[in-house]
Amino acid sequence: MSPQAGLLQIDWDAFDPWAVTPVRHRLMQHPLLQMDALMELGARLDTRGCVRTHSNDATAGTPFNNAPRMHPNRAGTVATLAGIAEAKAWMSLLNVQTDPLYRTLVDEVLDGIAPGIARRDPGMCYRGGWIFVTSPRTVTPYHFDKEHNFILQVHGRKTLYVWDPHDTVAASEQARDLFHATHSRDRLQWDESLRARARVFHLEPGDGAYMPSTSPHMVENGDGPSVTISCTYYTDATRRDALLHRAHERLRVWGMEPPPVGHSRWLDAGLLAGFRAAALLRRCRARIAGAPLPQPDREPYALARSS
C-alpha cells in the first residue's frame, strides 16, 4: 500500500485541527496489523520496555498512569497477544515508530495526509504509533495525551468516548497546565456524568476518529478482541499550546492565577517571548559548555517513552 492509495479518508473541507472529527481508513488488511506480525513486534518491543498492559479490572475511573501497577497483567507479552480473546487484558505496543518496520507503517499513514494537515496545521513532527490489542470488554481509562491523534479501528469493535479539547468541565485548565508541565494527569478526574458531554463513536473495522491534543477520551471494548492503531504527531500549534500551558503552571507555582490559554493575546505573546528567550539562553549556555540541549518536541519521530 502506498501513501497515494489514500489509507485515510478525511473531509478536508470540514477538517479543523482543534475539533474532534470522524474519519475512515483502509488498514484492515495491512500485513503489519495482522496478529502474527503483531506478536513478532510485541516480542521486539518487550525487550525495550515498550509494552504497556493491565488486566480487565481497570475501569474508566482508574488513574491511567497507574493502571498497570494497580491491575497487573502477569502474562508475558507474546502469550497475551497469542491468547488475547481469553487473556482478560489490555495491551499497548508503544512507540512502534522506533521499530524500523513499523516506522514505515506510521509514515504510510501520515505521509498520505501530511499535505492536507500542513495547509491547516503546519509543522508536523514527532510522529508516533501506538497499537492497542485488547481482550473483550476491557477499558482504556479516562485520560488525555499531548499529541494530535488519528485513532483507527482495524479488527473488532469498541466504543470511543471523546471530549472537546476546550471542554473545561471534562478537563480543567489547571489539569491541562499540570499535564503539559509535568506529564501528570492527577488533576484529570473521571465522573460518570461526563458521558453525557462526550462525542461517542461506535467503531468498527474501517472506522476512526481524529482527536486533537488534550482531548479527554475513554474506550470500552466490545464483546470480541480488538486491534486499533493510533498515529500521532505534534505541530507548530501543539508546541505553542504546550509551552503556554507550561508557562501558566509556572505562574500558578508563583501564586498567580492566569486566565485560560488563548483568553489574553497580550499575556500569551509575552509568555511565549519570555519562555522562548529563556530556552534559547539555556541552549546557548549549554552549547558554549559543549553540551547542546536537545529539542525533543521538534524531532521527526517521537522518542521512546511511555505515555
Image (cartoon, helix red, strand yellow):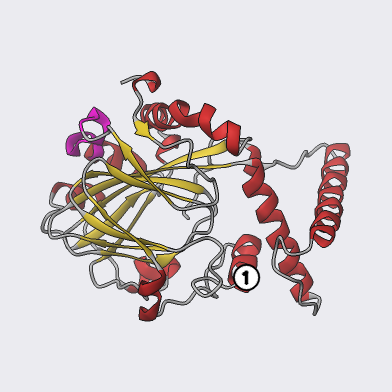
Question: Residue 37 in magenta?
Answer: yes
| 255 lies left or right of 306 | right
What secondary structure is the magenta-colored segment mainly? helix
Which residue is pictured at 67% across the width and 54% down the height? 241
Q: Quadrant of the N terminus?
A: top left
Indicate whether 113 appears above or below 164. above
The residue at the point 36 percent across, 27 percent down is: 101
The percent position of residue 177, horizontal first and vertical second, equals 65, 66
42 displayed left or right of 123: left
The residue that label 1 is drawn on is 173
User: Do we see residue 168 in this rendering?
Assistant: yes
Q: Residue at x 39, y 22 (%)?
A: 3
Question: In the rendered image of this protein, does residue 197 appear above or below residue 89?
Answer: below
Percent position of residue 264, x then y: 78, 63
Q: Is residue 109 left or right of residue 223?
A: right
Image quarter of residue 293: top right
Where 262 sits versus 127, above or below? below
Q: Which of the two residues, 176 or 99, is positioned nearer the viewer here? A: 176
Does the magenta segment cover residue 5? no
Residue 276: image location, x then y, percent: 81, 49
Relative to 284, say whether 104 is above or below.
above
Task: Look at the image and give the residue range highlighted in magenta.
Answer: 29-38
The amino acid pointed to by label 1 is Glu
Give SS at disc 1.
helix
| Viewer-nearest residue: 264 or 93 | 264
